[in-house]
Image (cartoon, rainbow, N blue to C red):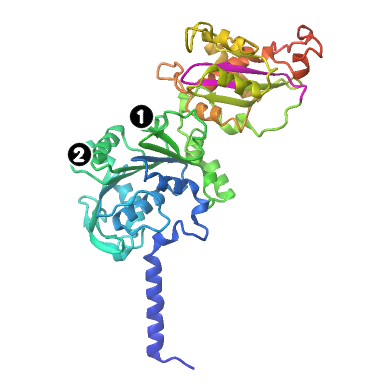
Amino acid sequence: MARTKAQLIEAVEIAEELKRRARMGLRDTYFPDEGPLRRELYAKHCDFFKGGEKFRERCMISANRVGKTAMGAYEVSYHLTGNYPEWWTGRRFNRPTSGWCAGDTSKTVRDIIQYKLLGKVGDYGTGMIPGSYIVKTTPKHGLPDAVDTVYVKHFTDGVEDGVSECGLKSYDQRREAFQGTEKDYIWMDEEPPEAIFTECLLRTMTTNGLILCTFTPLMGVSDVVMSFMPHLGHEGVIGEGVEVTPNKLLVMATWDDCPHLSKSEKEAMWSSIPAYQREARSKGIPSLGSGAVWKFSEERIKCEPFEIPEYWPKAYALDVGWNNTAALWGAWDRSCDTVYVWNEYKQAEAEPATHVQSIKARGDWIPGVIDPAARGRAQRDGVVLLDEYVGMGLDLDLADNSVETGLFKVEQRFAKGTLKVFSTCRGFFEENRLYSRDDKGKVKKVNDHLCDCLRYLIMSGMARAVHELEALDSYEPREHRGQNATTGY
């Protein structure tokens, strides 16, 4: 049956209205139960949301293109409107809120943050904040089409209970622009200067408000980065969210954490990024530039684990202390003079007996070298650590602690490809990402226990290496082993 003209017009109007509503519901397409953007595929983003319930300060330090800005706008939109989804496990506000969103310049705030929140100029409501909730916006003077403040209807338990407001600010307004009123949340997209970050902490202190930071660390090991990464050597920093302090959460995300990036896209981006920025832009690892101790990408020094032949000699290096005790194990392929670091251990605030048990579990026949400072250091009761460890059955000798010579020998092996680290040694790679020199050229003595172990291992540890038959005296005596002419091992 043919439709009348009126019916056709009505059908067109309905279709247009459905398109408009779909356009106004951008937020609903993110992190749903099903579909290509479903929550289970974006675990890091959901870790960030969940952290809001416990942590006042949260930071996602991540690669480019992982959706961190969309993630920040997504959370802010719910704090403005109050109609949180059923699955939301983060902080909820049961009243209208007052907050700020900030970026590096007024122009980038307009083009990125404002666009994510409101949508295109002239079509507000097509961003993360649904159009039906927007009460009004006020203009920012001096920049065309820029918004200063957005006002949004707030609902608690489905009942409208007031209007939330959110101001859009930029770091180029300087610290003084961030003084004054208290805020329920402040979202900083792109890394803020330390002075502005501190000011924002003060603005949210009395309200127990939220600090949200989302950025790629292109400014290197800055004070703000280090405030979220003081324990970079601990297991899991590139894994799940890490509790830095009881009030502070760090989440890191790489290209591999985002299924919307195809292999070809990642390859194209990698080839177009300057080499010194690749770690930061693909993994969120702060770029150390000329300050890095060993200037090699992880891909160059990393290898996948394999079963080590039983005839390869093994040894380990041990760095001891109450704050952290660490060890690295190496295996030596004599045929090509290549050392493989195949295991690691790192534990804080534990007694020597605990460390010894873990060390022996890797092979109680494997000899090692120990930080020579252990010869004069006591962990408890005045007992010298070296004597204590030897007394509990470890075969230990003092390591060669020549710092610059050791660093150079490690660097040479990395450069020649004769030193590889199993990808499972995550603690080492996490330390190495911030293993750097200060402006005077001295190595920074912060979270470097496994890096010290690598130096000990290459300088003197592998010279003690044996395989299990040698250790059990059922093979040729150690003094009859031929030394490698290059390494002296």
Q: Is residue 158 above or below residue 335?
A: below
Kindly identify the residue that appears in the image at 49 percent across and 32 percent down. 276
Kindly identify the residue that appears in the image at 21 percent across and 55 percent down. 139
Q: Position of residue 306 (x, y in %)?
A: 70, 32
Q: Quadrant location of the C terminus?
A: top right
- Find numbered disc 1 in the image and state the secondary structure of the residue it sits on: helix
Q: Which residues are magenta?
A: 310-328
From the viewer's side, name the closer residue of 166 and 297.
166
Q: Which amino acid type corresponds to the residue marked 2 in the rendered image?
A: Gln
Q: Position of residue 277 (x, y in %)?
A: 48, 35
Q: Is residue 167 visible?
A: no
Q: Is residue 476 above or below residue 326?
A: above
- Find numbered disc 2 in the image and state the secondary structure of the residue it sits on: loop
Q: Which amino acid type corresponds to the residue marked 1 in the rendered image?
A: Asp
What is the C-alpha distance between the residues marked 2 and 1? 20 Å
Which residue lies under the disc numbered 2? 179
